Image (cartoon, helix red, strand yellow):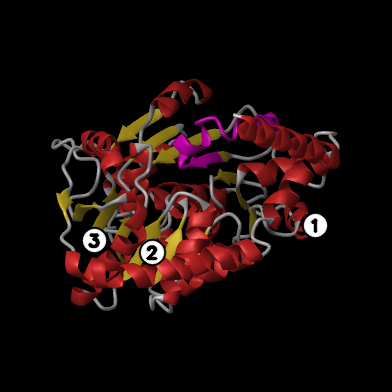
Amino acid sequence: MTFAALNLSLWLVKQCNSMGIKNPTPIQENCIPRILAGDDCIGCAKTGSGKTLAFVLPILQKLSEDPYGIFALILTPTRELAFQIADQFSAIGKSIGLKKAIIVGGMKMIVQGLELSKHPHIVVATPGRLADHLESCNTFSLKKIKFLVLDEADRLLEGHFDEQLKIIFNALPKEKQMLLFSATMTDTIDKVKHITSSKVFLWESKDKSGVVTVKELDQRYVLCPTDIRDTFLVEVIRTFRESNKDGSIMIFTDTCKHCQVLSMTLNDVGFQNVALHAMIKQRDRLAALAQFKSSHTKILIATSVAARGLDIPTVELVINHVIPNVPTEYIHRVGRTARAGKDGMAVTLITPHDIKLLHAIENTIGTQLTEYKVNDKEIVTILTQVSVAKREAEMKLDESDFYEKRRIHKRKKLILQGKDPDEIEQILEYRKHKLKKKTRNV
């Protein structure tokens, strides 16, 4: 099968060839013709299977036939993914003079408002920031869009973005093509078929083995005590580096604080890295990602903001510093490696308390994780060094303004709700004082 056989225009086929993309993947092969035919589409396939191009190519073809702005709106749950999708549109649509706007948090709203007022062909946005623009200005309209794309649809529709999506959907026309894509088909996606038309085309990648992750992915675990998890992490990295000196490593952890402390700790013990989490300014997040993508820095430590959709071909190892509570989150995280037919490894650190979570993940992905061997003697040797580095990192973080951004965001949210942030803070302090007093009396 070739791209030309999918009824794509010659200029798009040439653009794909110039980028080294010769043949369509199964999701592209099945979904592109149906999207070009005007059907709504729900597509689900493993990570690294080419889902983004499955909607980028038909949208650009339709745009070239009837160019106007704003032609398509693409919603995505994370800022980094929004930038990546926009880059795909730019790379393939440059020959038709494509204009795009990226509307995400952490950037200046005034600048974004000006971009929207110029009616770009493609708008790629996170729901929160786009909803803010729709409520605060009237310099643009979404009433004429042809396509609405929900990328990582299961994440967008699981409930966290309901308020923002309601605002956005009220600003959209009734007649539009709905395209929903994700790596994991959940009950949530199944339930939202009613928001698509009666002509919806559902395509889900079928694997006879029942394995949800790709066969090129080597999935391992390391059993470790909770209190020295970081030491085992350092040893996993060191062990991997013995056989692979240049491969890039992504490390996922659970909170922004843990992410920052871990980054500072690893830098201190000799593993240069960059961090990516919600408490970092957007320009610094983009800079960190650029450093990692260019292989200038070989280790990226992140929260789940980097778990979905990011395509970084050089990643050869994914480490779960903390096992995710939800199996689908595990699938997205480990999907950052072994992409597009390449080999990759995922190692998950588990404590005795995590056994049930491990079994739940194994049942979901249809395969069992095998043990990743580390040298126990080395663990004992580096334990003190890692522990001291972590304590120093925690002290430095406590002395910094790390939590200031969160405090400002909370105050802004309260003000927008018509509440007095100072009064709320006083009430919380009073409650905290009462709780401490009660605890002492007990």
Answer few, some or many: residues within 10 Å of disc 2's Cα (few below 14, many 20 plus, some between 14 and 19): some
Give the vertical position of 91 relative to 268 (above or below): above
Query: In this rendering, would 227 be left or right of 404?
Result: left
Q: Which mark is residue 312?
A: 2
In the picture of the structure, the residue carrying the numbered disc 1 is 110
**Dots 1 and 2: beta carbons under 8 Å?**
no
Quote the CA–CA distance across marks 3 and 1: 42 Å
Q: Residue shown at 45%/42% (left/top)?
A: 152
Which dot, 3 or 2, sits closer to the camera? 3
* Residue in front for this viewpoint, 424 or 14: 424
Query: In this rendering, would 233 be left or right of 220?
Result: right
Lower position in the chain sequence, tag 3 or tag 1:
1
Q: Residue 199: give x, y in percent of width and height.
A: 44, 24
Please check the rendered image and state whether residue 403 is part of the magenta-colored stretch, yes or no. Answer: no
Q: Which residues are magenta?
A: 148-172
Query: In this rendering, would 282 be left or right of 54?
Result: right
Secondary structure under the numbered disc 3 in the rendered image: strand
Secondary structure under the numbered disc 2 in the rendered image: loop
Q: Residue 293: give x, y in percent of width and height.
A: 43, 70
Q: Which mark is residue 344?
A: 3
Q: Residue shown at 53%/54% (left/top)?
A: 256
| Residue 216 in view | yes
Q: Which kind of residue does numbered mark 3 sit on? A: Gly
